[in-house]
Image (spheres, rainbow, N blue to C red):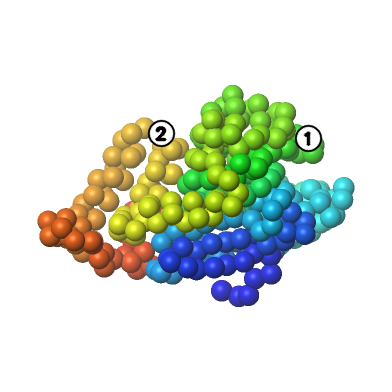
Amino acid sequence: MAETEQVAIDLTDRILTITLDRPAVMNAFTAQMMREMVAAFDRADADDEVRAVIVTGSGDRAFCAGADLSSGAATFDYAKRGNDFGQASSPLRPDGSVDYDHPGVRDGGGMLSLRIFQSKKPVIGAINGAAVGIGATMTLPMDFRLAADTARFGFVFARRGIVPEAASSWFLPRLVGISTSLDWCYSGRLVSAVEAQQAGLVRSVHARGDLISAARDFAQQLTTQSAPVSVALTRAMMWRMMGAASPMDAHRLDSRLVWSRGSSADAKEGVASFLEKRDADYPDKVSSDLPYFSPWLDELEW
């Protein structure tokens, strides 16, 4: 991928770490950061060396303090700001009004959340400090959130005169329930790492100095002995079936994937390695061997 300016990328021991890297402004979110993060997830999916992704922030103060507010009162006035997120044309009509059905009327945080949702590799958030606004909502489509004991989460949108974004109205209630979601979003209060853990948003809380090593150990635990293609499919199945109308939807997809994977080289290796009491060496690759069944596994479209 092209050289990045607002995120740092490291691939070590099959774990790709994406670090939000604007510590002087508490890793405030920009359109450029969004594009660089999307590109990093594209790289992770395409690279069979990558088994898991960790997302964290640089510096001691914040994971991500939310949107960059340097534009002042125009920060959230997207019609005035122009085409930040790469849309091909403007949603503004000649008279200056907004065509809300135009594909350019898109939330950049939501574009990032949807990209994380579609990741083929497990995603772990290592929340090293304040996670506010998009800094909180971008973590929701991650599979797990580990937090430093100093971390705070803030769904502060109503305090800024706006509304929750990044598809968080879909993700947050599924993680913590509707009442807790409304409490956090109505009030905009800061939520401690311990409260977030008690509510189910955070998997575990760590001393800040131990956070990244804990995340890396967990990533290894998740992936070292598992077939990468099976992990990728399991991630897609679990996330997509959260919105299914009935268990029959899951049964239809499960059945196709069980048949498909049952005849795969991975399945043969999985059984053989168990019987021979040795570590498995799975031959199938995420980049080339993922089975595809429509409409369950279709790419999400605007």
Element marked by disc 2: loop
Q: Quadrant of residue 4?
A: bottom right
Q: The N terminus lies in which quarter of the figure?
A: bottom right
Instruction: Residue 23: give x, y in percent of width and height.
Output: 73, 59
Q: Quadrant of residue 133?
A: top right
Instruction: Residue 71: give x, y in percent of width and height.
Output: 85, 54
Q: How would you rate the neighbour count of disc 1 (Cα within 10 Å): few for under 14, some for 14-19, many for 20 or more?
A: few
Q: How would you rate the neighbour count of disc 2 (Cα within 10 Å): few for under 14, some for 14-19, many for 20 or more?
A: few
> Does residue 35 appear anywhere in the picture?
no
> Does residue 150 appear anywhere in the picture?
yes
Vertically, is 93 above or below 182?
A: below
Instruction: Residue 212: give x, y in percent of width and height.
Output: 54, 55
- Decide if residue 182 is on the left or right side of residue 83: left
Report the disc number at residue 245.
2
How far apart are labels 2 and 1 at the CA level?
Answer: 34 Å
- Decide if residue 35 is on the left or right side of residue 232: right
Q: Compare marks 2 and 1 and give the one earlier in the sequence.
A: 1
- Outermost top residue: 179
Q: Which residue is mark 1?
A: 159
Residue at left 63%, top 75%?
3
Residue at left 69%, top 69%?
5
Element marked by disc 1: helix
Vertically, is 261 above or below 253?
A: below
Vertically, is 218 above or below 40?
A: above
Kind of residue sitting beneath label 1: Arg
Residue at left 43%, top 38%?
242
